[in-house]
Amino acid sequence: MPENDPKQPHDEGSGVSRREFLKISSISVAAVPIMGTHVVEAAGEPVKVYGPGKVPVELTINGKKHALQLEPRVTLLDALRDHLEITGAKRVCDRGECGACTVLMDGKAVYACAVLAIETQGRPITTVESLMQGELLHPVQQAFVDNDASQCGFCTPGFVVAAKAFLDKHPQPTAEDIRRGLSGNFCRCGTYHGIQQAIAQMAQKGV
Amino acid sequence: MPDYSWPAAEQRTLIGKRVSRVDAPLKVSGRAKYSYDYTRPGMLFGKILRSPYAKARIVSIDTSAAEKMPGVKAVEIIQKPGTTVQWAGDEIVGVAAVDEPTAEDAIRVIKVQYQQLPHLVSDAEPPAGVGGVPGPMSEDDIWDATDLMSPPQVASQVSQLGVTFKASPDVIDEFKKFGLPAEIVEAIQKAAYHPLAESSHSASWYQKASALHQGDPDKAFAGAEAVSEGLYGAPVITHCCLETHGSTAEWPDKDHLLVHLSTQNVSGIPGQMAEPLGLPAANIRQQQDHIGGGFGSKFAADRWDITAARLSKKAGGKPVRMMLERDSELQVAGARPSAYARVKVAAKTDGTLTAWHSESWGTGGPGGGGMPPIPYLFNIPNQHKEHTAIRNNIGPARAWRAPNHPQAAAITMCALDDLAAKLNLDPLELFRKNLGITGPRAENYREEFAIAADLMGWKDKWRGRGQDRSGSVARGLGLSIHTWGGRGHSSDCDLTLHPDGSVDIKLGSQDLGTGTRTCILMVAAETLGLPIEAISLYIGDTMYPPSGGSGGSTTIGGVSSSTRRAAVDAREGLFTKVAPALNAQPADLECVNGTVRVKSDPSRSLSWKQACSKLGAVPLTARGKNPDKSKPPDLTNSGVGGVQMAEVEVDTDTGVAKVKKIVAVQDCGLIIDLKTAESQCYGALIMGITYALYEEKIMDQLTGRMLNPNMQFYRLAGISDIPELVVHMMTGKGYDERGVIGLGEPPVISPGAAISNAVANAIGVRVPFLPLTPDRVLKALADHNLD
Amino acid sequence: MRAFEYATPQTKEQAVGLLGTKWGPIAVLAGGTDLLALMKDDVEQPKRLVNIKDIKELHGVTSSAQGLRIGALTTLGDLADNANVLQDYPALAEALNDAASPQIRNLATLGGNLCQRPRCWYFRNGFGLLPKDKVGKDLVAEGDNRFHAILGNSGPAKFVSPSTIVPTLIAYGAKVRLAGPKGNRELPLEKFYVIPKTDTEREHDLRPNEIITEVFIPAAGGMRAAHYEIRQKAAFDWPLAVAAVALNLSGSKVLSARVVLGYVAPVPWPSPEAEQALAGKVISEDVAKAAADAALQKAQPFTHNSYKVQLARVAVKRAILKAAGGAA
């Protein structure tokens, strides 16, 4: 007979009803939901609670502010790709395991799939799209081109962003620094040789 | 007739040089658009409910809750109740919704009842005595057979083998209810009943695939001066394309379908979608700018793609994006068959190979799979080989870069390496000794061995097995050789010269990251005497002339030949128009450096723009084809060789193996772009390190599931695992005049064998199966110490 | 990922107030690198996420004569770059730099690292923390246990504790401080981890309505410590065995030692046997080997993971030698 698939829902229904949300809250709830937000009381103070439906989310991407309506469950990566059509960051593993979605947050390389869009509000996000100066490639990008550091190219934007962040922090890296510093990105075509050469070229130039 | 042949070495301005790939600026800046990136206003998101069981009959499906869910626009049952799913992750129901989270929510409320059936996901050595003549068929066997064969074939098998159950009216009704084709039902009713026969699962899981005999192996083994025996093999691995499989489908009107499908086979997609969707192929348009990896797994319009098209139709034609999740990608969208073998190989004391005996097995999923081409490359005079195919529930196999060759190399080259060790010979010597039986490229291998040995420093570094140690670090060298075909596929190319001087090229081909775009442009630019930037290239659309799928390393041969012929014909057409203005005969003209000029008097010339203005009002389009016997010579060829050597370090306390250096020497005829050709080799070596040391589709017999459908435990090498790589391409005389031959596959064949041989050389004992993980290395060491 | 509501409390009291008394419905979001993956895999299905990153007092690292106070929200990357860590706790810096990837280290917090869930593939594939099939068959014991526990595995829990950093923190004598509805409490980090006996229990002593506020590491003094990981890949790979060692030396003689293993048991595994074997000795290859043997003496591997006994032994031995040979 049919068995419960462990991956199937443990409870009936999909989304969670408003009523259930109120029920699970261990503290008194005192608010009318407005635009998907309501207020609960915690430690004697009112705290705003967002969602589960769509709520206003303002993202700062490449210096530009974007006002979106998103459920809290939308990741930064999906917000970029599916809501803003900024598709340079790729969705590959969606679990923070491969690096293809690398973007900069507060200037540091992070996996956009491992962050919720809603929690990046007020934190500037930089994507691969902003690295070019007009029609001119960023030196890291040019080094990737010169050293044939892309094949199918699907991992490339993530690698370029990771490489930029790495070189910003380690302008004069050793070979060992390069290996460690770029260990958060995987490539399937096997472009690592070209990437090693590209970074070494950058290091030599001292860019 | 114009001369279509490749320009002589001294005349080449681009061909054979290192040219940066033309689409690299798009790729490094995130501007390259992949199928996964294609977004349209109002686009819906597709998701698929997949089977949690490796084998189960679908009893019932209730999609009502999903259909009622706000935001859900279409629901499509993919496999109806009564169907038997054959692997975990098999597609059951598809939905399309306004956004991805809603589609996921909808999938969760679909209720499916399954009747679980016994499964096999292991590909361990078949138990003795199985895999003979198949026995009578159980009910399950019959259902399984319907997934693999046509109804007449199943009916005929039922008649031949009989059944293990009584065909009572109830049983027959059940079959009918679940949609078993009438002719099979009829065959069941007439079939012989074998009540005492054991459940024939084992019979259907293991199938004797082939037994081949050559010469007199018994006699050769009996009289052998040396015999080496061993166990070798490579497991199932997945393609793990970074861009998952999938597509976006939309119906601009009710009779036309537009798809953006991630594929290695742009021109082939409409023909595959036409029948299941019931519309003419001409009404289906496929577009793809860039593809994020294929490696042999993306030739077909898959079930999920058909589902996306059906969902889109149900949703009024709105675009539906259906891209697989990572776990599904690893579970169902491609796997390389496993191959293992018990091998006995005999030789004279000087290393001359005399006999081969192998009992091999492996799985390619429910389809079983055939024997890998062993002994690989070396046509040993006396052979006996048997293969048992395991037809299990791990999901379907797909062509994986150089299908069957890496496995065959791992089995053969490791067996020969063990034989060399047994004979106390340097394997380089044994391999060279036997090059005479490798076929037509023996001399190429000899040349390549010399170069590779030099680049590796083989002579200085090589020691006998287990002889190079300091503390717990053991060092070793290993080698392997390989071959591949690579003749150019069919390709049509339209090259148009416009009166304003612009040039465009159109082909329904695709660039997998191999450098296809760059090479097409280099050939055209070389032929027309123009810079690459002066030419616009359009590929990846079924609106363009068809080109073959990118498989078997056939693309470069195909597209470079068709482009060359198109460019030569266009150039000749231009000469005809321009000749009067230059007061010359067309045959006296040449295209050089952006001019059209008289060969004997270069001062009589026109700029390219001026020349094209002579075309008049109508552009000139020439279509080049491959193959094209009417326009000789044949510009492509078949058959390449390569030699690889690996150097490793193994920590014998931990079993962790690291590759320190690989040398690859490779020929592939006339190289168009040396830079992207070398990249193919670097990439293949890196992929080779990955499958040699890390990769394995780990299946769990208890749950029937893949345990590592993610990128943490489906391990890919990272940049820190990549050692010094040395690539040497054979070019010049003896190679260039062969014509253009594909390169995507050959260099990925040898790394597994070469690395395994290097590890054996380092630690003094063979680790039988890839990947060479610490547990396997330590076990091999421990087993050896027990002996 | 299932829908959830989301709150960003500004104080730890508010955060605690937003949590519940049962595991499951409400989860704390810190770095999120593990939690979001678990939610996408439907292993965790919270209906509310409490993002604690706005709570200022959970940030920051401060050094004093007593030791180092590390706010729970300090990212692994910031901690690895911290001057005090680099100078006084080099083994910790190394463990941090070995953890995951640069991008993960920029997001993941120390508190989150302490609370990350096991990587057991049955757990992650939805079969539960103490995975069983429908007839009660123990999936780990009877299935593919190549990466599972070799110590502390006689009960139903057979996963390995996933943090690669915690063994080193324990070796340094770290304490963890928690805030809950009844105020704060502190416990030695090793006591924070427990082996669950039922599927409703967790692998640590944190209660559903508590958060980690900080980790405190006492001053290292002249202690010599080392972290050693055996990984298949050079980087960004879950280890097969981890060992952390801290030696308190007088001259070349060991006064006392801490030896903590990782990736061998459902909890970080301090080894009193190894510690005893080192006490009073001058470190040598043989002494290190004897201590390593002692640490693994009680190992009970399953069908496919006996190689891990050897790996753990090597990790312990190498960590001891590294600690003895390295700088303070």
Image: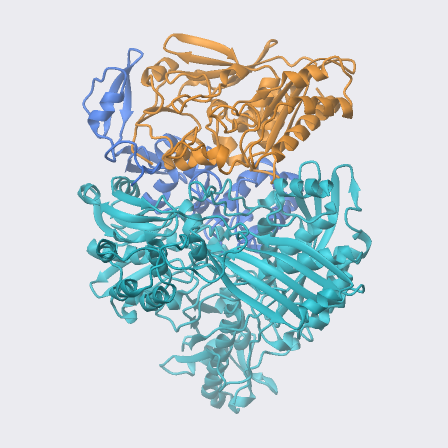
Chain colours: A blue, B cyan, C orange
Point 28% across, 39% down: residue:
B108
| Residue at left offset 48%, top offset 33% | C140
Can you see residue C127?
Answer: yes
Which of the 4 image quadrants contains residue B305?
A: bottom left
What residue is shown at x 56% (from left), y 66% (from top)? B211
x then y, percent, for residue B593: 56, 74
Residue B155 in the figure: left or right of residue B21? left
x, y percent for residue A147: 59, 54
Q: Residue B382, located in which quarter of the rendered image?
A: bottom right
Please tell me in which quadrant of the rendered image residue A8 appears. Answer: top left
Is the residue B258 above or below the residue A153 in the image? below
In this rendering, position of residue A38 left or right of residue B674: left
Residue C122, compared with residue B165, is above or below; it is: above
Left or right, A57 with reference to C36? left
Q: Residue at x 41, y 55 (%)?
A: B200
Point out the image quarter for the C terminus of chain B: top right
Residue situated in front as seen by the camera: C19 or A171: C19
Extreme-front residue of the structure: B196
**Does residue C218 sit above or below C110 in this rendering?**
above
Q: How many marks?
A: 0
B176 and A26: which is toward the camera: B176
Q: Is residue B728 visible?
A: no
Horizontal arrangement in the rendering, residue C153 relative to residue C230 (left or right): left
Residue C187 image offset from top left, x and y in percent: 51, 11
Up-down relation of residue B192 to residue B494 (above or below)? above
Q: Position of residue B221 (x, y in %)?
A: 71, 65
